[in-house]
Image (tube, helix red, strand yellow):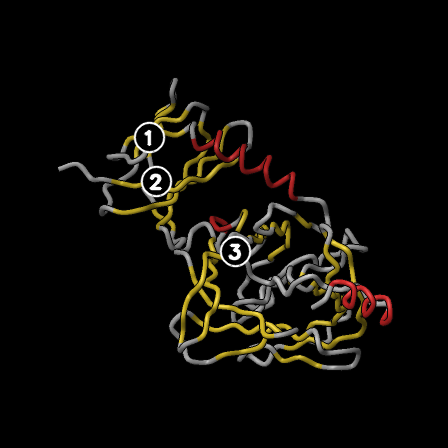
Amino acid sequence: MNPKLLLFLCCLTNQPYLYSQDWFQTGDSWTYDVTTGWEASNYGLHGLKVLGDSLVEGETWKKIRYRQITQPDEYFLAKASGNQVLARQLYGMGVHRVYNFDAGPGDTIRYSNNQAYYRVVDTSTVLIAGKWRKQQIVHFNDEPEPFQLLQGIGMTGRSDLPLSPNTCSFLLPNFPFCTGVVDGYDFRFRCFEDSAGNRYSPQNSCLQIEEEEEEEKIREAMVWPNPTTGVLQVREEIEEVKLYQINGTPLSGVQIIQGYPTRAIVPKLPLGMYLIEIRQTNGSVFRQRILYFPTL
């Protein structure tokens, strides 16, 4: 479209123009924090990331990876279609709609197979990282607390209510993550980062995530060797060690030998990946995946 004509139309309608329908670009990522749920070992930073194109039935979708802590990675597909977003399972047949920015106040959107829905109560536009994005204020399943849907970013809660407990959820898989009402987990939206490195967070928590990830790297370096044959060494004094299967099932039999470095001796286990949780005497807790090779 002619740029001058585009500018004229924007001024004529008095509505900012969304430069592109950029819901999913390879490299886009979303970070969430799990703070409650069935498995304490799964608390911490979870994330979505757009991996690239996937051709399904002659149509191009974006493959998105959902990464948590104790569970294997999950994958699903999504794409923008005009002002709407569609999603489907990686190997499933059904397609469902999760966002519809053609909807206005009073419209109800059912977005998944479990009959969850949201009702639009207000619409507007918001300037984020140099782009005007459409915004819908909605009520999720008619709950009283409002949510904010941002075009290209998703469901984030309300940026004008920084203490709102409903700063959570991405809605892209075929079930909602929010306040533990579905799967036992409380997901809180922390940071969106597009493929160009621009970031958005309603609570300015992107920098905090960098600090947490850097701290986690330091903590991981405290435990060695990894892979291990059963004897782990830790730089700090240990108060308690817990061991889990990668699916979160707890295991028993870990022995602690205090000293410098402190040693944690894990029981005989089958070859595989496990999750170790170490509580130090100062009260701090860190978790790490370990690869176990049993000795002959």
Near mark 1 (Cα within 10 A), the count class, few <14, some 14-19 or many ≥20, is some
Mark sitting on residue 290: 2
Q: Quadrant of the N terminus?
A: bottom right
Q: Quadrant of the C terminus?
A: top left
Asked whether disc 2 touches disc 1, contact meaning CB atoms under 8 Å apart, the reply is yes
Q: Earlier in the sequence, mark 1 or mark 3?
A: 3
Q: Secondary structure at mark 2?
A: strand
Give the answer, above or below, for where 206 lies relative to 68.
above
User: Which residue corresponds to the image point at 58% horizontal and 53% vertical from the top-left?
Assistant: 30
The mark lying in front, picked from 3 and 2, is: 3
Front residue of 296 and 166: 166
Q: Amino acid at mark 1?
A: Leu
Q: Amino acid at mark 3?
A: Leu
Q: Which residue is mark 3?
A: 48
Q: Residue furthest left?
A: 296
Residue 32, how many percent across, how many down? 59, 52
Q: Secondary structure at mark 3?
A: strand
Residue 50, how many percent across, how many down? 50, 57
Residue 91, how many percent across, how many down? 38, 72
Q: Amino acid at mark 2?
A: Ile
Mark sitting on residue 184: none
Q: Which residue is mark 1?
A: 232
- In three-dimensional space, the C-alpha distance between marks 2 and 1, rounded to whole angstroms, equals 10 Å
- In three-dimensional space, the C-alpha distance between marks 3 and 2, rounded to whole angstroms, equals 23 Å
User: Which residue corresponds to the image point at 36% horizontal and 51% vertical from the top-left?
Assistant: 246
Tell whether 166 sits left or right of 271: right
Place residue 179 in its image quadrant.
Answer: bottom right
Q: Secondary structure at mark 1?
A: strand
User: Which residue corresponds to the image point at 61% horizontal and 62% vertical from the top-left?
Assistant: 22
